[in-house]
Amino acid sequence: TADQVESADGAAVGESVGGKSPDSKKADSEQKHSRRVLVSTHTISLQEQLIEKDLPLLNAVIPREFTSVLVKGRSNYISLRRYEIARQRATSMLNEAEFVQLEQLKGWLTDTPDGSLSSLPFKPLGSLWDEVASDGSNCLGRKCKTYDQCHYYRARRRVQGAQVLVVNHALFFTDLAIRNEGGFGILPDYDVAILDECHTLESVASSHLGLKITNGQVQYALNKLYNPATGKGLFVAMDLHRMIEQVNQAHLQIDQMVFDLDTWMGRDAGMTRRVRCRLEIPNLLSDRLEALSGSLLKLSDNAQDASRRQDLVSAGNRLQSLSSNTRSWLAQSDEESVYWLERTQTRRGELRMEMHAAPIDISTRMREMLFQKVPSVIMASATVSTGRQGGFEFFQSRVGASGSLTTQQGSPFDYQRQAELIVVGDMPDPSARKIEFENLLPRMIERYLMRTQGRAFVLFTSYSLLRATAQRMARWFADNNMTIYSQADGTPRGQLLEQFKQNSRGAL
């Protein structure tokens, strides 16, 4: 039907095979009409469950076979051309840690089935992956010598032939935004969109329709050209030393802007402050970035080598985007958006300033971009209804789906028999007595792991606490013949989960 539906599912209903199977049948039964179903979730774990467990099960019971594929964003794939260039420029671009991982990629490339991050046996440094990842702004397309072997384009060909697409919300809204601006979408056309975990839609959509600029983003882009601390960068690799002074001047301007924004926030403003009117702060940063961008694009016009030209164009466009976004934020150019500043510190104690803007109301944009364009939309979540008659109204109004059909389902869980909730009354408050809490936490975990003999998830709200607790408990696990699987050790989460499932005395 050409209707939009919201469903409030009890725990495990929307995440199970029963939540998706009717539309898999629809894709199968109308195959001759090339109907395609898209399923979008917020978390990687649900995407992997759909691809590895639920959809194969459906394929086994539905009379006619259908095809499904997990669609990943482009930056998840390695670029063979950029990898080779990184090897050629390693001495002038990479530090020691990045170089070591670059060598590890060499062996992985001979065995990887799809060239994606999830198949890597280690977690690469973000700075290295940025050098070798597939990038739409730094791609030669069919002119590339590695086009036929390109992992990204191979994945795209698989996507074009699939009837069921599994994506995440971030990729889904990126595609919607591109289409809304008149561009060609990242995803192929689809007839049915199933949006699971739809309670996250408003925040994801707001971030994709808004702005976020940080001093870290600008410094990172500049350091890619030339890093004063290491003496490495693209300008060194390309023998463009005469351009280094422009980078240094831009670094000075981003430092000045951080100082000005920090001064405006004041010492008593806390971590976040609303910006209610246009800030009268000098913006020499955008001028410097635009000048540097112009120099890069001018150099690209005279570049003979295609890869060199593409690198210059990509870097120039990135700086231009940062410049225009900074101007837009400072000018508060969108009257329908709210603007704010966030001030934090990095692990090194350096000041981090984030300039944010987000639309106050996304309902109109959602109607125009999604509900008026896609024939059938189904949204499911355990937390979009208040549990009373008409309990969907608030959610419907926020996402632009007022008047759509609704249904509320129960949960198959027998909570009385299948769950035990323990509230520990003698643990210190982690916010008020942080060190005491962290010291007692391993002993509390040990108590319950002895009861279950492993077979447990231990969930944290911060990576630093997860890492510290795992290190403290490593000896205890060994002494008690149990295995600890820590997400802090860099192993991809899919591999970590599979290892945990194979071990009857493990804790993840």
Image (cartoon, rainbow, N blue to C red):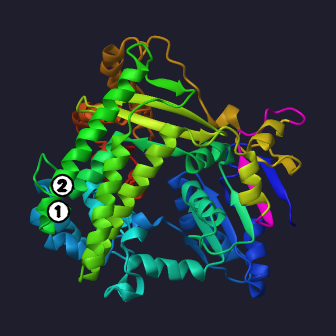
Quadrant assignment, res 178 = bottom right
Residue on which the image places disc 1 = 235
At which x and y percent is residue 143? 37, 87
Does residue 29 appear left or right of residue 131 in this picture? right
In the depicted structure, whether residue 235 falls above or below residue 274: below
Quadrant assignment, res 374 = bottom right
Residue on which the image places disc 2 = 226
Q: Nearer the viewer, residue 401 or 222?
A: 222
Q: Is residue 187 visible?
A: yes
The residue segment tinted magenta is 373-390
In the depicted structure, whether residue 139 falls above or below residue 11: below
Disc on res. 204 = none
Quadrant assignment, res 481 = top left
Does residue 129 appear left or right of residue 447 in this picture? left
Q: Which residue occupies 81% across, 49% down?
A: 401
- Label 1 close to label 2 by CB (< 8 Å): yes
Under tag 1, what secondary structure? helix
Q: Which residue occupies 45% across, 51% down?
A: 324
At which x and y percent is residue 176? 63, 61
Q: Amino acid at mark 1?
A: Phe
Q: Amino acid at mark 2?
A: Tyr
C-alpha gap between disc 1 and disc 2: 6 Å
Label 2: how many residues lie within 10 Å, few (<14), some (14-19) or many (20+)? many
At which x and y percent is residue 14? 70, 52
At which x and y percent is residue 205? 62, 49
